[in-house]
Image (tube, rainbow, N blue to C red):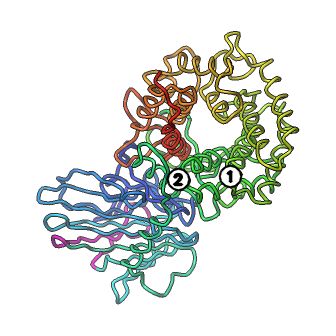
Amino acid sequence: MAAAGAIDTDAAFRPHVLREYALLADGERGALLGPHGEITWLCAPGWASDAVFSTLVGGSGTYAVTPADRRHVWGGYYEPSTLIWHSRWITSDGVVECREALAFPGDPGRVLLLRRVLAVRGAARIRVLLDARAGFGRHGSHGLNRHDDGTWTGRTGTLRWRWAGGAGARPHPAAHGRSEVLVAELTVPEGGHHDLVFELTEQNLPGDRIDADREWRATEAAWRRASPGLKDTIASRDAYHAYAVLRGLTSSGGGMVAAATTSLPERAEEGRNYDYRYAWVRDQSYAGIAAASVGAMDLLDGAARFVTGCLLADGPQLKPAYTVDGHPVPSEQTLDLPGYPGGTDRIGNWVNQQFQLDAFGEALQLLAAAAREGRLDTDAERAAGVAIDAIERRWTEDDAGIWEVDTRQWTHSRLACVAGLRAIAAVPGADATRCTSLADAILAGTARTSLHEDSYWLRCPGQPGTDASLLLPPVRGALPPGDPRTVATLHAVRQQLSRDYYVYRFRHDQRDLGAAEGAFLLCGFMMALAEHQQGHAVRAIRYFERNRAACGPAGLFSEEYDVTQRQLRGNLPQAFVHALLLECAGRLTSDQLTPD
């Protein structure tokens, strides 16, 4: 039984639909922020660490800055080209904002979370609640100490924390376990502001108190430096935002997580929820290629550096995914938590036990893109050789494929390798004859087993129907745009897997496409690129516009979109969706577009 006056953060902040969350990220970790100013998800010190705020998946712990007036409505926005978010509430008697950011770029060993309450109109009355609970809620805060300067310090699990700006806070017993929650009531006069600074680390806390003004200035300046001058993009606001999301998900070593979260279900009660807090070679390659298309060289360089390191370390045994620092992904396990509604709680991923042939092809496409920009160093050249050797050795093996559904001779995997080999063959100094001959052999072998009588590519030998992922290899140069197989596959995807300009991955069974899973936003943007390659201007823009609208107020995309309910499904934000949006924004401006 909870003690009298105990604070139950789990009950106070229930999960929301995913479209209502905003992302704060600094490259080393990310936080999800709900509409009541509650940070419901943050892993520390890094992406794949245990969460210290985990109410999103049924754990405990949150950090909330919420209007005291219960009658308020929520909104918010990002400052342009950044992940500096403004929560905005209209209350009964005024307007309140809270400017929020993880200090950027992030320190791998220390979380620095900045929150600034702004009284926009009328005095701002705010309730602040801090309940840090490491280990997905297993460890409450203890050793709370208020210092003479008004800062609070405490510990949770192996983490030490310090909080400034809550001098008037009072500890309350937590409803879960022997720990305490800090609660503060703030009033900020109209036009004024109040800073809250939260630090979290496994090391000793620095001796000096944080200067909030200095940290805000440094974060603003860092985002300005990071923001590229995106060249010739359409939907430039969304393009800059997609870049900011990708940059926020990318660590200092170049590794980019596939998403900031784990266990957010793609389909309720079907067991399709996974941990995406790791760096997939494929996703990394998509992001780097997109960055190259718009002139964002820092993301291109980081992606090439990360993939190069993985190839040189593991060679033909390349794993599909790694931690952002290049280590093996831990195997999947479950937590004793309720999970996000409709899902189950999982950390780790079985991907480290898979072989995905297409990763080698995607890596070659990325390295070729770096070469075209004059950014391929000696290590990357050696890595390209490793990938070519691996494809030559392993292309006839069964693999898990892009969707990781089972192990077969997936057509997309082989065509991705064809595209990579052709791309790298064009790089000065490459063994063009060897690469081209190998590409021709793989293409011919795949055509013998995986081509429908109507000339479109099948998903794999013996399996009827096509796959939306097969749109991308021709865009990357596996086949010419006018090749009958390219044209027929585009037509087949349009007929079999596209509905109202949303695109589904493949047909699972005889159910309607939307009954089996959500529309796959990655595939929608692939379709835009494929239509663009054919010169179908109107169709390309329709697919692009339809899919870029499938987000919430914070402009974040998940993996799937439930068209019927207009809801996001899966982990948030999904990096490869933002990558393909960015690439579309760069490529769809070409003068080569002609009317359909």
Which amino acid lies under the numbered mark 1 shown in the image of this protein? Answer: Ala
Residue 324 x, y percent position in the rendering: 64, 58
Residue 421 x, y percent position in the rendering: 78, 39
Which range is magenta? 168-191
Q: Is residue 164 above or below residue 291?
A: below
- Give the residue at x 43% y 40%: 341
Q: Residue furthest bottom?
A: 148
Residue 8 x, y percent position in the rendering: 34, 58
Front residue of 225/428: it is 428
- Give the residue at x 46% y 43%: 557
- Give the residue at x 67% y 10%: 454
- Give the residue at x 64% y 51%: 279
Q: Secondary structure at mark 2?
A: helix
Q: Magenta includes 170?
A: yes
The residue beneath circle 2 is: 246
Which amino acid lies under the numbered mark 2 shown in the image of this protein? Answer: Leu
Front residue of 54/303: it is 303
Q: CA distance from mark 1 to mark 2?
A: 18 Å
Which quadrant: the N terminus? bottom left
Residue 132 x, y percent position in the rendering: 44, 66
Mark found first going from the N terminus, 1 or 2? 2
Q: Is residue 230 above or below residue 421?
A: below
The residue beneath circle 1 is: 370
Q: Residues within 10 Å of mark 2 (few under 14, many from 20)?
A: many
